[in-house]
Amino acid sequence: MAEKRNIFLVGPMGAGKSTIGRHLAQQLHMEFFDSDTVIEERTGADISWVFDVEGEDGFRVREEKVINDLTQEQGIVLATGGGSVKSKENRNRLSARGIVVYLETTIEKQLARTQRDKKRPLLQTPEEPRDVLEALAEERNPLYEEVADYVVRTDDQSAKVVANQIIKMLEER
């Protein structure tokens, strides 16, 4: 990849966006950002706190601003939050400003990868995690597909293998 195009990772929580993104950035000698981490840095509070105080709508406003700022960078790998695709503005910016890779995974893998994670506000409810993830998948999977240039399954492969797969796909582009 002679020119450094931005690579944006989308997909549900537990798909491996942050982990795979770090591997990708390292191998491509690009800077890595995680939109949730940037939101936490800018607010000085964790995502759960932002959700508690401002609700999901307040969080989404912050997320939109961060994604707008980050997607204007050049030569970055960005792991987006699972719900970032709910915003048409975010989808448009991601599509226009880089290559979008949808990291696809099953509900089973999401459950396994998120079961001990207390930093996922949407899973900190009285509802069963499986029910929450299924409802989110129904709403968001079509949006991930809409915005994606590539779709990669992450279920049974290490983050490093998935990162290498993405690099190969980009080289063949």
Image: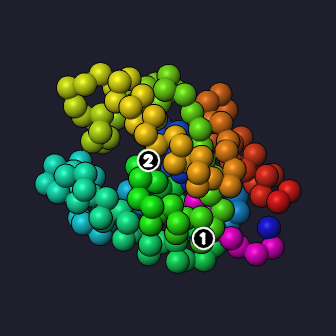
Which residue, given by chain and number where applicable, does mark 1 sit on? 96
Which image quadrant for residue 171?
bottom right
Q: Which circle, 2 or 1, is nearer the viewer?
A: 1
Q: Which of the labelled discs sits on residue 82, or is there none?
A: 2
In the image, what residue occupies the spot 58% across and 55% down? 147
Q: Quadrant of the N terminus?
A: bottom right
| x and y percentages locating residue 70 in the rendered image | 48, 72
Badge 1: residue crowd in 10 Å (few <14, some 14–19, many ≥20): few
Marks 2/1 in contact by CB < 8 Å: the verdict is no
Q: Which residues are magenta?
A: 2-8
| x and y percentages locating residue 100 in the rendered image | 62, 57
Nearest the eye: 91 or 4: 91
Q: SS at mark 2? A: loop
| x and y percentages locating residue 3 in the rendered image | 76, 75
The question of residue 3 being in magenta is answered with yes
**Can you say whether 115 is above or below 27 in the image?**
above
Amino acid under label 2? Answer: Gly
Residue 32 visible from this viewpoint: no
The question of residue 109 being in magenta is answered with no
